[in-house]
Image (cartoon, rainbow, N blue to C red):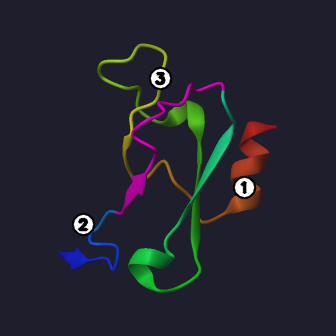
Amino acid sequence: MQECPAGKTFRWTVKVDFQCTRFYRPTDFDIVAACLHPCTERWEFRFAIIRTLAPHKHCAGRLSNLVRLDGRWSADAMGTFARVL
């Protein structure tokens, strides 16, 4: 387990902090990027195609705000963009 400077705790995965006050639609954008600097203290990013992320459990047509970096995320920005185009 590792403690992020922002106070978030994780076990081998990093939590992405989507705004809890606005649940995004899968059509709001194509790709999301997560900056890992708050947890790793390195300027590294991971990218995911929005349509692969989990839906919200209670708000139909919205993305879950409980997002963890897993196999759906990639460090390869250009590869992620290419899969969307």
In the image, 70: left or right of 73?
left
- The residue at which mark 1 appears reads as 79
Q: In percent of the image, x 82 and y 37: which residue is there?
A: 85
Label ID, residue 10 = 2
The mark lying in front, picked from 3 and 1, is 3
| Circle 3 residue | 62
Q: Is residue 16 left or right of residue 1?
A: right
Q: Where residue 61 sits: x, y (%)?
A: 49, 16
Q: Is the magenta stretch mostly helix, strand or loop?
A: loop
The answer to whether residue 69 shows anywhere in this view is: no
Residue 61 higher or lower than 9, as above or below = above
Image quarter in which the N terminus is found: bottom left
| Residue located 58% across and 37% down the image | 50
The three-letter amino acid code for the residue at tag 2 is: Phe
Which residue is found at the position 32% from the left and 63% from the top? 13
Earlier residue among tags 3 and 1:
3
